Amino acid sequence: MTDEADAGGLHPGPIAGRPAFQQALREAFAHAAAAGARELWCCDVDYAQWPLGERAVVEALQAWAYGHRRLVMLASRFDEVPRQHARWVAWRRTWSHAVVCRALPELKPDDIPCLWWGGDVQLRLFDTQRYRGAVETQASDLLQSREMLGELWLRSIDAFPATTLGL
């Protein structure tokens, strides 16, 4: 891929501020659907500031979700997700075979990166307090992040089941 990601207006460059971060995430999900990314990885402390429950994001995920695709969500905790992202939770029930949610109980929240990775593009926050980061398409950055996500996967445990059984 070139240095330009051309689907959904997603272009490499800096992110400054929460509105820009959220817009970049919307564009990243749209890009993944348009590009047919086989694997998506999301990592955050709790996804409280992500636009997961927005109609546009869920529609992009619906367009993205086909056989042999996988969405991996890593987090410190998932308690904010059902409270703030009901539309995503409902979508996830349908696609639970393609969505894996895992917790990182050994890590402190400050040690968990804020990262969206989609194969040929990633969105990464360097400063989560001020929402400063970048959209990146360089192969070396993508490889380094994917390796880091793999290491986090090894330290994670199953969390946030798609359905709960009860009496």
Image (cartoon, grey):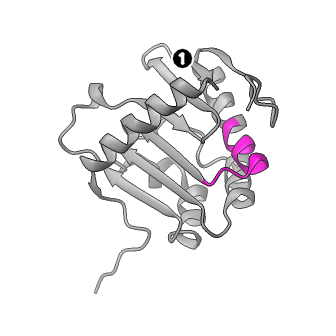
Q: Is residue 85 left or right of residue 3?
A: left
Residue 43: name its quadrant: top left
Q: Which residue is mark 1?
A: 133
Q: Is residue 6 left or right of residue 37?
A: right
Q: Nearer the viewer, residue 66 or 80?
A: 66
Instruction: Provide the secondary structure element on which disc 1 rests.
Output: strand
Q: x, y (%) of residue 74? A: 39, 46
Q: Is residue 167 left or right of residue 118?
A: left
Q: Nearer the viewer, residue 87 or 8?
A: 8
Stretch of the chain drawn in magenta: 28-38
Residue 123: name its quadrant: top right
Q: x, y (%) of residue 42? A: 49, 42
| Badge 1 amino acid | Gly
In which quadrant will I find the C terminus? bottom left
Using the image, determine if residue 161 lies above or below residue 155.
below
Instruction: Please say whether residue 104 is one of the residues in the magenta stretch.
Output: no
Q: x, y (%) of residue 149? A: 39, 40
Q: Main secondary structure of the magenta part?
A: helix
Crowding near pointer 1: few (<14 within 10 Å), some, many (20+)? many
